[in-house]
Amino acid sequence: MSDSDGKESLNYPLLLATIVIIAIMVGAATMKLLGGDPETKVAKVKITKEQLADFTAHIDEMVAGYTVRVDEKGWPVVHPPAGSDVYILARAYNFGRFTLELEKGKSYQLKLTSNEIRHGIAVRELKLKETINLGEIRSVAFRPEKAGTFDMVCSEFCGYGHESMVGRLIVTE
């Protein structure tokens, strides 16, 4: 813009819009760098094939020890006690043939691994999103803060059956 003397003047609406956009970008970058949810703590450990077999045994023990009923699909509903380790093995388009039931506001240690390729686990409503790499156990401190029934979906494209990789998580009051 020019004023009557031919000098350039500031375009205040454009300047304001630019400042707002920069502030939003800086805020988003800061949240990403700070890690988002302070209640989620993650640790990774590389594993061998023998440790993967042990991991599978832990899943079998968890399902056998903490099944409280069977859901409409005929899958066991597994309700581990608060504070316990919860084992999830991502493989061939499923997170295990069981429904997980946790308690609202209680803490759990999710132990996540994959026996084939990289997968991910995401429950949008509970702000849970983790990548599950082949050959490592990802240990995630997790405390669900909302009751309800939620889909656990794979957040990493894992092949032609990816869209069907949906598990179920129930959070009770």
Image (cartoon, grey):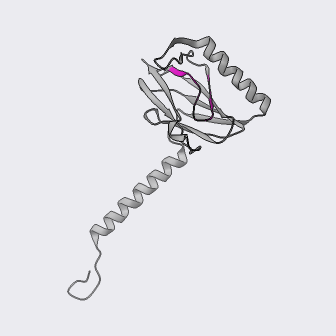
Residue 133 is at least partly visible in this image: yes
Residue occupying the far front of the picture: 160
Residue 47 is drawn in which quadrant?
A: top right
Q: What residue sits 50% from the left and 41% below the top? A: 36
In the image, is residue 89 part of the stretch drawn in magenta? yes
Instruction: Specify the quadrant that holds the N terminus.
Output: bottom left
Q: Position of residue 155 (x, y in %)?
A: 53, 41
The residue sitting at 28% across, 79% down in the picture is: 9
Residue 113 at x, y percent in the picture: 66, 33
* Side (left or right) of 122 relative to 10: right
Residue in the image at 46% along x and 31% along y:
151
Residue 119 placed where, x, y %? 60, 40
102 w.r.t. 126: above or below: above
- Locate the C terminus and report the quarter of the image it occupies: top left
Residue 140 placement: quadrant? top right
Residue 76 located within the stretch drawn in magenta: no
Q: Which residues are magenta?
A: 86-101
2 sits left or right of 164 in the view: left
Residue 134: x and y, percent? 69, 40
| Closer to us: 28 or 150 | 150
Figure check: 24 above or below 7: above
Q: Quadrant of residue 97?
A: top right
Total number of numbered labels? 0
Residue found farthest to the left? 4
Q: Horizontally, is 147 left or right of 108 in the view? A: left
Q: Is residue 7 left or right of residue 167?
A: left
Can residue 78 be seen from the camera position used here?
no
Between 102 and 167, the one lying in front of the other is 167
